[in-house]
Image: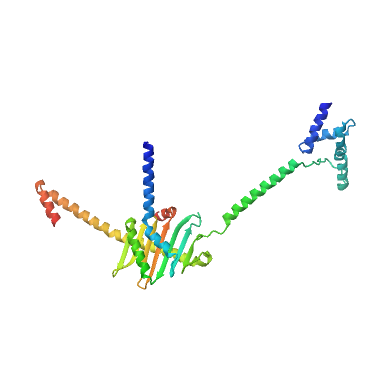
């Protein structure tokens, strides 16, 4: 019998922690309808009687219909409250981080961020004011670079043409020299080169 | 021991090449910096980022001034001083007067131009790798 009471005490503890199943709760209700309840558990009797009958009556009065089943009210323990609060805090934190990331992504991006101009020693950093000037600077700089690249191309092109002509002349000279006997080749070469 | 020597040589080579890159434009860089505190000199510093990737595309410094032959001369002298370290260079003169200078140091280009009206302009363009690859392709 003591073991049975011990089991009931365990069930009671789990009931107040909100961890009991429907079957276990029914066992508790049945137990508290008995007359031979030990003294230390008697104080719970009105509570369970209320859960079983009083609550049903109250709902019947409110709805006008007999309740099919009544979910027992569970006492919220400090542990459970902490768990719920922690869950809510975690959800809020996730929402906050997601919001910040979204804001960062969608915030107005300016490709000229960090640019500035200096006029007579005065530094102006307001992009909305200096934007036309910045755009003009980019255009001007690119134009200047393009001009320089074109100049470079013009400078290198004639050189390669000249080299091509020189190579052709050298090849023709070599062909002429090869037509002569070996003992005369050196003399012909010196004549051509001195020319 | 051998590994340690190899590492030491590698570090020396690396620091040597870095030092060369840094010293390549040091006279010009110093002069550009000096201009920030000068009166009657206009400077635009543009940091141009890519709209899609939000990465730096190019940084441009443009310096312009009028009727300041001394400063124009300083720039010409600075170009002359850093000339040997430039990868590419173009200089144009008209009637003995330097009109255009263009130097390229790797991904940084310096250009100088001055007109007959006394106006002078210097541009420094630093292209960042990705953008440079795009222009090459």
Q: Is residue B70 above or below residue A49?
A: below
- Give the farthest residue toward the right: A35
Q: Nearer the viewer, residue A124 or A56?
A: A124
- Identified at 39% across, 41% down, the residue is B7
Q: Residue B14: image x %, image y %?
A: 38, 47
Q: Residue B86: image x %, image y %?
A: 34, 56
- Quarter occupied by residue A24: top right
- Quarter occupied by residue A45: top right
Q: Nearer the viewer, residue B66 or A58?
A: B66
- Identified at 36% across, 65% down, the residue is B74
Q: Residue B137: image x %, image y %?
A: 40, 54
Q: Residue A157: image x %, image y %?
A: 29, 59
Colour scheme: rainbow
Q: Is residue A72 above or below residue B48?
A: above
Quadrant that contains the N terminus of chain B? top left
Is A89 positioned to the left or the right of A126 in the image?
right
Residue B114 makes an appearance in the image: no
Residue A58 makes an appearance in the image: yes
* Count of number-bearing discs: 0
Is A24 positioned to the left or the right of B98 in the image?
right
Q: Is residue A64 above or below residue B108?
A: above
- Identified at 38% across, 53% down, the residue is B21
């Amino acid at each position: 019998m003591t073991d049975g009471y011990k089991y009931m005490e365990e069930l009671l503890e789990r009931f107040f922690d909100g961890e009991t199943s429907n079957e276990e709760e029914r066992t508790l209700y049945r137990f508290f309808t008995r007359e031979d309840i030990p003294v230390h558990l008697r104080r719970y009797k009105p509570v369970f009687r209320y859960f079983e009958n009083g609550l049903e009556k109250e709902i019947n009065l409110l709805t006008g219909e007999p309740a099919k089943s009544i979910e027992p009210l569970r006492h919220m323990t400090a542990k459970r409250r902490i768990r719920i609060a922690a869950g809510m805090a975690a959800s809020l934190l996730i929402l906050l981080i997601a919001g910040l990331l979204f804001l960062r992504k969608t915030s107005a991006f300016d490709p000229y961020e960090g640019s500035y101009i200096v006029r007579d020693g005065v530094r102006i950093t307001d992009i909305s004011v200096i934007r036309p000037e910045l755009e003009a600077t980019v255009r001007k700089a690119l134009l200047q670079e393009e001009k320089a690249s074109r100049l470079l191309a013009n400078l290198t092109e004639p050189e390669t043409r000249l080299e091509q002509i020189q190579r052709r002349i050298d090849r023709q000279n070599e062909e002429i020299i090869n037509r002569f006997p070996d003992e005369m080749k050196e003399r012909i070469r010196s004549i051509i080169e001195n020319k | 021991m051998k590994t340690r020597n190899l590492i030491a040589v590698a570090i020396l080579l690396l620091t040597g090449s870095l030092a060369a890159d840094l010293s390549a434009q040091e006279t010009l860089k110093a002069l550009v910096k000096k201009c920030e505190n000068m009166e009657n000199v206009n400077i635009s510093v543009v940091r141009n980022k890519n709209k899609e990737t939000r990465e730096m595309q190019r940084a441009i410094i443009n310096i312009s001034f009028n009727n300041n032959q001394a400063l124009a001369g300083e720039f010409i002298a600075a170009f002359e001083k850093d000339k040997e370290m430039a990868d590419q260079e173009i200089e144009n003169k008209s009637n003995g007067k330097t009109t255009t200078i263009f130097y390229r140091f790797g991904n940084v280009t310096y250009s100088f131009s001055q007109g007959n009206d006394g106006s002078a302009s210097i541009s420094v363009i630093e292209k960042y790798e990705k953008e440079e690859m795009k222009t090459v392709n």
